[in-house]
Amino acid sequence: MARPLLISPSILAADFAVLGEEVRALDAGGADWIHIDVMDGHFVPNISFGVPVMQSIRSVTKKPFDVHLMISPVDPFLESFARAGADGITVHAEAGPHLDRSLQAIRSLGKRAGVSLNPSTPVSAIRHVLDRLDLVLVMTVNPGFGGQAFIPAMLEKITEVRELVRGRNIDIEVDGGITPETAGAVVRAGANVLVAGSNIFKSKDYAAAIKALRVGAESISA
Ligand code: DX5
Ligand code: ZN
């Protein structure tokens, strides 16, 4: 049974001077989730923002916060993000020495647990933690920056993940270089949650940009 298509705009590409307004506009524009990219300048070569910024926009929308932690070590920060209003927390497979323990910690905080796979990370990294997973995030660029080009080799990986999680209640999310043009291919490969940053924020009309992603996702040709 096909899982519902969800659009999760990344606020990494938002205007931080008016972040609350930006989140309101995404909410009104039909975003399903709000994607929160947290970067530490260590696990990835860029720094974004942390718990206080996320907390400050929690009151602006009721949409689920889809928190993507690109930080290492990650375990010491899980509780603060959970308390600050995360709904799902995704960690990278390499973000700590004990992935299984990190996933248990997220679930014990009452949050949906996700694992993110870098482009070079094999799908086998999640094979033995499937029972602890609610979401797999396939990075379709190397994490760290918005606005990068989609890596086509990730289509095969998405399909591999789909086969591995078949029959389970697990979302497959993609992140990086998602546009109406790439959306169809990733959904056909097996993704059901699309993260998009620059593609949405470069548009003046977020509702139209989100709609265009949905239309692209439903297209049957590449
Ligand atoms: C990259 C982030 C992405 C990024 C996507 O490290 O995880 O969420 O914001 O940006 P676009 O959609 O511009 O590729
Ligand atoms: Zn992300």
Image: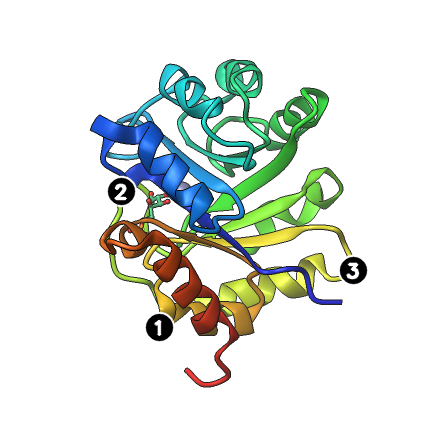
For residue 94, side relative to residue 113 (left or right): left
Query: How many labels sit on residues?
Result: 3
Looking at the image, which residue is at 53% across and 26% down?
A: 97
**Which residue position is annotated with label 3?**
167
Res 218 visible = yes
Is disc 1 in contact with disc 3, using a CB cutoff of under 8 Å?
no
Residue 132 versus residue 167 in the image, above or below: above
Q: Give the residue at mark 2.
A: 13
Tell whether label 2 touches label 1 (CB within 8 Å): no
Check disc 2 and give the amino acid type: Ala
In the displayed structure, does residue 192 sit left or right of residue 152?
Answer: right
Vertical relation: 189 (above or below) 26: below
Which quadrant of the structure image shows residue 208?
A: bottom left
Ligand 1 neighbours mark 1 (CB distance < 8 Å): no
Q: CA distance from mark 3 to mark 2?
A: 34 Å
Find out if the beta carbon at label 2 lies less than 8 Å from the nearest ligand 1 atom: yes
Q: Which mark is residue 93?
A: none
Query: What residue lies at 27% left-to-right and 42% top-to-bottom?
Result: 13
In the picture, measured across the screen, residue 17 lies left or right of residue 11, that is left
Q: Quadrant of the N terminus?
A: bottom right
Residue 96 in percent (x, y) is at: 50, 26
Q: Is residue 153 visible?
A: no
Marks 3 and 2 in Cβ contact (< 8 Å): no
- Could you classify mark 2 by the number of other residues whose Cα lies within 10 Å: few (under 14), some (14-19), or many (20 or more)? some
Q: Earlier in the sequence, mark 1 or mark 2?
A: 2
Q: Indicate which disc, 1 or 3, sits on the residue closer to the N terminus.
A: 3
Quadrant position of the C terminus in the picture: bottom left
Mark 3 closeness class: few <14, some 14–19, many ≥20 residues within 10 Å: few
What's under tag 1, amino acid-wise?
Glu
User: Could you tell me residue 12's position as x and y percent?
Assistant: 30, 38
Give the residue at mark 1: 181
